[in-house]
Image: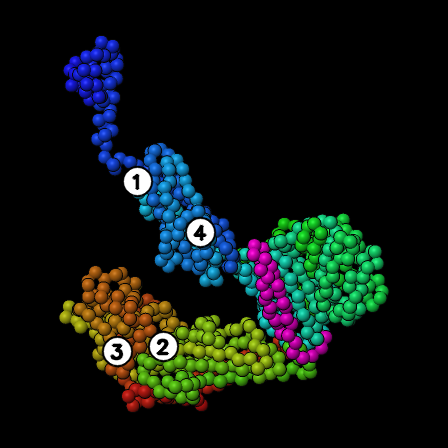
Amino acid sequence: MKIKKIDKIGLSPKKWRGHHRKLSTVSVSFILLASMFTVVLMSMPASACHFDLSITKTAPAEVTVGDELVYTIKVSNFPGYGYDAENVKVKDILPDGVSYKSVDHAGLLWHSGNTYYFSLGKIRSGHSKTFQVTVEVLPSAADVITNTAIVYYWEGGDEWNPDNNEDSCDTVVLRPHMEVNKSVWNVTHWDDSVHSHIGDTVHFNISVHNTGSEDLININITDTFPPCLEYISGSAMPFEPVQWNSHLTWVLFPNSCDCGECDGKVTNLTLQYNGDYASLIRVEQKDGIIVFNDTVAPGGQFSFDGADDKGTLGVEISIFVDNALHTKIHTSCSQPIGPGLVSGDFLVIDGYSRNGGKLCPLPCVECGDETDEMLTYDEWAYIEFDALVVSCGTNVNTVDVSAVAKHSCTTIYGEDSATVYVVCGNFNPDIETKKTVWNNNDWGESTGANVGDTVRFNVSVHNTGNESLTNINITDYLPPCLQYAHNATVNDLSQEPTTVWGNNITWLLGDSLAPDGWLYIEFDATVIPEIELPPTPVTMVVINPGVQGPSYFDTTLSNVPEGYYVTNGSYVGWCVDLGNSIEKNHPHQATLYSSYDPYLAAKCPSAEDDDWDMVNYILNHKQGTWEDVQDAIWWYIGGGGMPSNPDAQAMVWDAYYNGEGFVPVPGEIMAVVCYVDDETQLTIIEVEVTPNHGTNINNVNATGTGVFSGETVYDEDDACVDKVELISSISIERK
């Protein structure tokens, strides 16, 4: 062993000489190992100091607007690495809709908008630091707000696992809201009004819909009857109301967000008097002390406090009406007492007990509150009842609803009404119909348009009688020069006709139309070529022109009478039927039809449900060879597959995107259908559209049935469509 190796642990040669005999082999080995270990530690770089910082963030699951929301943030240093983290900093990204209030147990460095930066200082290995950020929830907060906290800075070493340096939590912002709807049964459906007469029974519905994010309790529904109605006792569902004068009251889901059981006797009560007339009300404790003595109107509420030596009402109170004992209420807490308790003509609205605080509402066994204690989100509650019509006039039946939010104890309100029109005397149903057309400025009696243009019509139906009309039927008869083009509305709401048969367009409207009520129907119609074709068959011969084209067929017509849109001669022809064949160079007797005939399907079933607008578009937008044109036609009519040639495919897609509703204008081409029989191939010929003139009557009629008299009333109106040759324009006039 060389002494210079021993020098590394601090022994000089002199000391070694004095002690070497005392050192064992094991001792020397240990010293050497320690020497080597010391060298290794001294050579480790500073980056070898590791720690693992993690962050967790928690908050209440639910809050309401105006609440103070406390976020709890905890930063921990995992003990496995043994190093302290210095100068730890956290940034907290607050959600929109909250306002920063304060921070506890951390230093606020600065903030930018809703991002706040905090200093936690040193966090020792195996330790953690927790701080809290308090914010106020603003009305602009979203329904769910998310808060994110991030450990973004530290000193003293390297972060071993940055994946746990960020955490988020969500909080639901509760907002109570409800929708109240009052409706009355009107023959076939629920409506906001009905026409009736004396002696009729009308059926009402009240619905309460929880559209907010809080559960609702203590839903108080009060329905106020108009003079013409009387409640029919026993008709209400799901249970009978408390009735006082013309008011009906139901309490659904009686509960409380801040109540307790009655304990130590009742100290305060609020009662509602449901008698028929204003009366002198006196309330006495059992010891004779009078705690209330005043006149109260029907529906009026009044409160009083206990007056014994402990401030309670004792064990019982007696209620006198006009100095006569009317009822007694136990106030000792030995019997159920709370909002919802009915005693005689008195309803407990609110109350408190000495030790239990605010009294909880009594459960409503009839309405199922033993199992359903609140109206939750998107749930509905319904009340239905009947009333008897006893007098004439227009009467509005109003319902007022209040409800309490279970979490926030916020009270919300809603109301709605339904109207009963009581008609007395004779019923005189009547209806008035008017048809107009848009003339670029307003609805008028006439307008001008060209072939291919779209005109918009309005049909107005007015109930000019004294009873509601139902089963309203409105049918518009378009002339041959117009084609229905959809885009229909009824009272500004999209509603296509019930049926469209040719040019007959019908709306069947089941809703009733009240006296002086209006219906407005609007729709579009396109001006189409109106051609006159022979009503009887003509002679047709088809040949294949060969590869030179210019079409699939060369079609010759003969024996065509004079005065029609076609004449004797040769026409460009195409095949629209791959399922049958036709003999070439042979005379066939063919009937001709316009491809825009609104009754084409009825006249020629072989041409039913075909895309004639697409075919006419292709005939006017040809590409490639005649074979490509024929292939594109077959794709839409005739049963062919997708063409393989690019030009034919281009025509197919061009028609798909642009051909819907296409109408050729003068100078363009339209297809005329040539029908021989069901066993012979269907063909078409090309005919040029030329200007023509003529007068066409556009008629609309409307019918309706009186809901009481059962009488059907009728009215009609006309518009004229005059096509003139000048620039192929038309004018649409009222007749």
Q: How crowded is mark 4: few (under 14 residues within 10 Å), some or many (20 or more)?
A: some
**Residue type beneath disc 1:** Gly
Q: Which mark is residue 103?
A: 4
Residue at disc 2, secondary structure: loop
Kindly identify the residue that appears in the image at 62 percent across and 63 percent down: 402
The colour scheme of the drawn protein is rainbow
**Residue type beneath disc 4:** Val
Residue to which mark 3 is pinned: 669
Q: From what the image shows, is residue 379 above or below residue 431?
A: above
Tell me whether the residue at label 1 lies in contact with that at label 3, contact meaning CB atoms closer than 8 angstroms. Answer: no
Eye-nearest disc, 1 or 3: 1
x, y percent for residue 140:
45, 62
Q: Distance of mark 2 from mark 3, alpha carbons? A: 15 Å
Q: Is 668 situated left or right of 445 in this image? A: left
Eye-nearest disc, 2 or 1: 1
Q: How crowded is mark 3: few (under 14 residues within 10 Å), some or many (20 or more)?
A: many
Tell me whether the residue at label 2 lies in contact with that at label 1, contact meaning CB atoms closer than 8 angstroms. Answer: no
Eye-nearest disc, 4 or 2: 4
x, y percent for residue 320:
82, 63
Query: Camera-side residue: 671 or 133?
Result: 133
Residue to which mark 2 is pinned: 597
Return the disc, 1 or 3, that comes first in the chain's sequence. 1
Residue at disc 1, secondary structure: loop
Q: Is 480 situated left or right of 69 in this image? A: left
Query: Camera-side residue: 631 or 296?
Result: 296
**Residue type beneath disc 2:** Asp
Kindly identify the residue that appears in the image at 51 percent across and 56 percent down: 67
Query: Camera-side residue: 193 or 569?
Result: 193
Residue to which mark 1 is pinned: 156
Span colored in magenta: 390-419
Q: Is 338 situated left or right of 155 in this image? A: right
